[in-house]
Amino acid sequence: MYPRSWRGPDVCASTSREPVVVGVSVSLSGPLRRQGQDAYDGIRLWIEHCSSAGGLPLRLVALDDASSASHARENVARLLTEERVDLLLGPYGSGSTLAVAPLAAAHGKILWNHGGASDAVAEAGSGYVVSVLSPASDYLRHLPRLVRHRTGAQRATVLYAGRGTFASSIRRGLEAGARTAGFDTVRAIAFDSPLRNTKAAIDAALADRPPLLVVAGRFEDDVAIIRERQMLEAVGTVACVAAGVDGFHRELGVLAEGVIGPSQWEPQLHERPLIGPSSAWFCSEFRRVFQRDPGYVAAQAYTVGLIVGECIRHAESLEDRELLAVARQLDATTLYGRFRLEPGSSRQVGHEITLVEWRDGRKRPLEAPPFAPTSPHGRP
């Protein structure tokens, strides 16, 4: 049960006993199944706890999209037209989220987004996307400032997946951050994902001996690059997107040491939320139910449920237009951090990315140095 200090039981309070139907297309098979399972379990934990707390009864309809954007679109069409869901949660992955966002908008249905970080998601949803996670362009925006402060580096190479919008968004954010930090050059090299020739990609990336190398691909792409760590010995700082998740160290062991990555959530950083339980309680419950520790994918999926519940509580309605109006005005904190949408869009601007570095088998949160006086906001 929820801790007594949390006002959870009234979050989804209603006099109705008709179950509210929650729909989601989720990757339970295919290349994104690891992350999809984490998201699914985070959603299931929210469903269980919201219902057991004496609030609005919820019924989950989850359809496997096999990590395919086209299948995700088919699933969402079914959820909207056949299942007639009351609440539509987004899939995992920017490609699938981009595929389903216009469909949700066409039906006037909010897509509660927990798994699509591409900056293009906000535009694709025509105002009907509500995101809890930071956009991909923020993932490594502050990395160049940190690295220059640490080492004096002024050049970087980013090796990124050329197909899709997620890695490109990360690249653009890194480039913007590098300009702000006074970097001379950022060389961008695209590769086809999944990565076929790892050593050739590394050779291309290291041609000009960059002091900072950033890798932004799928989890398996990033891991494949870092497995060749001996080829990266001359690089002062190595960063990759996959380094933000616990599975990175499980795959690589000692090879993960010293690698920096972006994390959407570190449980020790947000212990007094205004909405919902603490990170400590969430981690304990997740371990109890699923026999493993939650990562940030599970946390953001659980959190989108908390935000849905808070919007229902304020709106006293399940009507999407009323829920959307509440979401656009909401400014609150959860175990996942701050929630606040940019006025006039669905871009998440309240939540902040944490840079982490693997040391002694653990992720260590890093603090970026203060902005230079000439750029107080860190934006180009």
Image: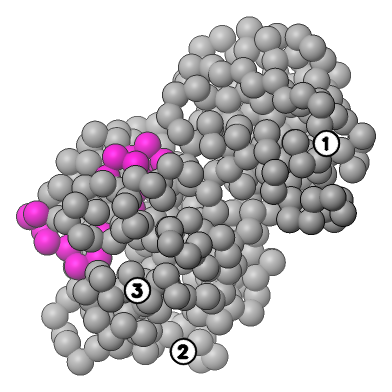
Is residue 83 inside the magenta stretch?
A: yes
Distance between the Cα atoms at labels 3 and 2? 22 Å
Residue 302, horizontal then vertical, whole percent: 44, 64
Which region is colored magenta? Answer: 81-100
Distance between the Cα atoms at labels 3 and 1? 40 Å
Tell me how many marks there are.
3
- Image quadrant holding the N terminus, namely bottom left
Q: Secondary structure at mark 2?
A: loop
Residue 373, horizontal then vertical, whole percent: 87, 54
Q: Quadrant of residue 12?
A: bottom left
Residue 10 or residue 180, whichever sits in front:
180
Residue at label 3?
A: 325
**What's the image's color scheme?**
one colour
Q: Residues within 10 Å of mark 3 (few under 14, many from 20)?
A: few
Q: Residue at x 70, y 15 (%)?
A: 205
Mark 2 or mark 1: which comes first in sequence?
Answer: 2
Residue at label 1?
A: 182
Distance between the Cα atoms at labels 2 and 1? 47 Å
